[in-house]
Amino acid sequence: METAYINSPLGITKIVGDENGISEITVANAGDNAVSGVIAIELQKAVSQLNDYFLGKRTDFDFKLNPKGTDFQQRVWKGLLEIPFGKTMSYLELSKRLGDVKAIRAVASANGKNPLWIVVPCHRVIGTDGSLTGYAGGLWRKKWLLEHENPVKQQSLF
């Protein structure tokens, strides 16, 4: 497995993967790890696309993913990939889409174990009342990501 650390507006981003795909993307507070000087070839596409995302030049990702998780977690993460850029969905809606409204707590748990920060967009899942509920990276990061993906546009007054 190769590992790279890059700067992002939300902290140092750690990317782990190999020729089979990217298995982990996480964020840490600045200063926790040094930014990588050299990026392994297996990680270069992911690094480039994440940088473009933060610059507002990318709304989706097309590098190979290889997250580790249970079958149920994999199903939830695939469901997260269907939430469009700039949109949100409640945990209840996601549970319904996955075919079991009673699985809401299990869906929320799988969401929280998502190993591919931003790329598998767990930040797009909110409470039924529209609240920003639980986020492993901190609610301030979730808020930033949602605003980055759907900025409020000032309309002309005249």
Image (spheres, rainbow, N blue to C red):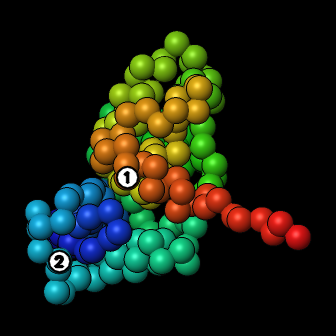
Q: Nearer the viewer, residue 37 or 54?
A: 54
SS label for mark 2: loop
Q: Which mark is residue 133?
A: none
Q: Earlier in the sequence, mark 1 or mark 2?
A: 2
Q: Residue at x 61, y 61 (%)?
A: 151
Q: Amino acid at mark 2?
A: Val
Q: Position of residue 101 (x, y in %)?
A: 57, 17
Q: Which mark is residue 35?
A: 2
Residue 47 placement, left or right of 90? left
* Quadrant placement of the C terminus: bottom right
Residue for badge 1 = 141
SS label for mark 1: helix
- Which picture quadrant has residue 50? bottom left
Disc 1 and disc 2: Cα gap in Å? 20 Å
Q: Nearer the viewer, residue 137 or 60?
A: 137
Residue 145 placement, left or right of 89? left
Q: Residue at x 33, y 80 (%)?
A: 44
Q: Position of residue 10 (x, y in %)?
A: 32, 63
Q: Position of residue 157 (x, y in %)?
A: 83, 66
Q: Position of residue 67 (x, y in %)?
A: 33, 50
